[in-house]
Image (spheres, grey):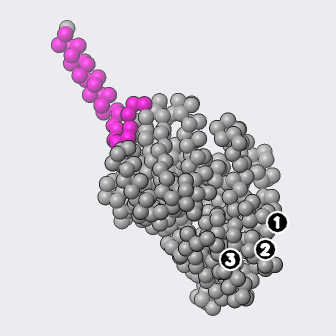
Amino acid sequence: MVAGAAVAAALATQAHAQTKQYGPGVTDTEIKIGQTMPFSGPASAYSQLSRAEQAYFKSLNDKGGINGRKVVLIALDDGYSPPKSLEATRRLVESEEVAAIFGTLGTANNLASRAYLNKAKVPQLFVAGGSQAFNDPARFPWTMGWQPTLHREGVFYGREVARRSPAAKVGVLYQNDDFGKELLAGLKEGLGPDADQRIVSAQSFQATDPTVDSQIVLLKDAGADTLFLFTYAKQAAQAIRKTHEMGWRPTTYLTLGSAYIGSTFKPAGLEASKGILTGGFIKEATDPRWADDPDVKAWFQWMKEYMPGADLTDTLNIVGYAYAKTMEQVLRQCGDDLTRENILKQAANLKDVRIGVLIPGSIINTSPTDYNVVEYIKLQRFNGTSWDEVE
């Protein structure tokens, strides 16, 4: 009888081992993931993404987590510095032993860590940056973006201008790094073969520059009547405010990653921001057209409970919520196989996933050869309080 019991216990242990496969950062009670964020520095406004994501995982954990496991998001400050981001990422992997890196902000910061994470075979998921470099599964299979790619967004704007304003004189303000240059390259492709003639001036700036006022003056003096702001929120607010103060009223397009009422338009001035165009991909929660939307209503209730006092007009809160919901989907698909290999596999096999706070028509599908997550965008115009779709 004792021998039989021992055999039965051994078989049960073996079956348990077969059904639960864990990699670093995972136990029966916990899944650790990590990110770096600019809690300080020139892009600190974007750290609100992390606060929303952490609040979402807390709400998820309060409901029992994922298959009984709490999701722990460890977020370290990188000051929006690529070297600091790499150093912090190494700490997350080697000291904290996280299962995956999730939602780190910035094209340059993520590129700084990409080679290291791919060599270490650590998932670098749902990068908060739109570079095409984050959809390169052939060379960097462990890295995946989330938002529409910068190049795709730039092409979209170029085609819109070519269609709507074929005689437009285009001026561009762009951040002098991979982020700004990729948007500019996409814009030129969308404008067509005569793009260099149509762009009357392109002015760059460094992310650490205290102001972009001089670049705005140069763009106005060049005769631009259509302005593209390929900037983060701080410089976008400066540029919008400066154009308004100068009495210059170009048709202005703002990259979707900065088209936020709370972090961009309020500092710039709502009146000064009226008429700004962008490529929308997520519901602006305070927009009256979503007042009766069940997913937006659920988000408001969640905000009331888990982010009381947070600015409801700051779109970063609903974007962070959507990022975290996508990560939740991946971890749920993993079941009890929570190895790094399977986390990546599930992220690369999202099928007809609908995140309710994305605009209607947006369905997430990924594959091992195409890592694009959010692809659907629509042109929209800020009316001073909310967004109107532009047909």
**What segment carries the magenta color?**
2-29
Q: Is residue 350 left or right of residue 307?
A: left
**Quadrant in which the C terminus appears:** bottom right
Packing grade of label 3 (10 A; few <14, some 14-19, many >=20) is some
C-alpha span from label 3 to label 2: 12 Å
The image shows residue 93, relative to residue 269, as above or below, that is above
Could you tell me which residue is drawn at 39 percent across and 48 percent down?
92
Identify residue type, mark 1. Glu
Identify residue type, mark 3. Asp
Sequence-first disc among 1 and 2:
2
**Quadrant in which the N terminus appears:** top left
* SS for callout 1: helix
Query: Does any portion of residue 371 appear in the rendered image?
Result: no
Q: Which mark is residue 271?
A: 1
Based on the picture, tell me whether residue 8 belongs to the magenta stretch. Answer: yes
C-alpha span from label 1 to label 2: 9 Å
Q: Position of residue 105 (x, y in %)?
A: 52, 58
Sequence-first disc among 3 and 2:
3
**Magenta: predominant secondary structure element?**
helix
Q: Which residue is mark 2?
A: 244
Q: How many marks?
A: 3
Q: Residue furthest front?
A: 210
Q: Are marks 1 and 2 in contact (CB under 8 Å)?
A: yes
Packing grade of label 2 (10 A; few <14, some 14-19, many >=20) is some
Query: Does any portion of residue 245 appear in the rendered image?
Result: yes
* SS for callout 3: helix
Identify residue type, mark 2. His
Q: Which residue is mark 3?
A: 213
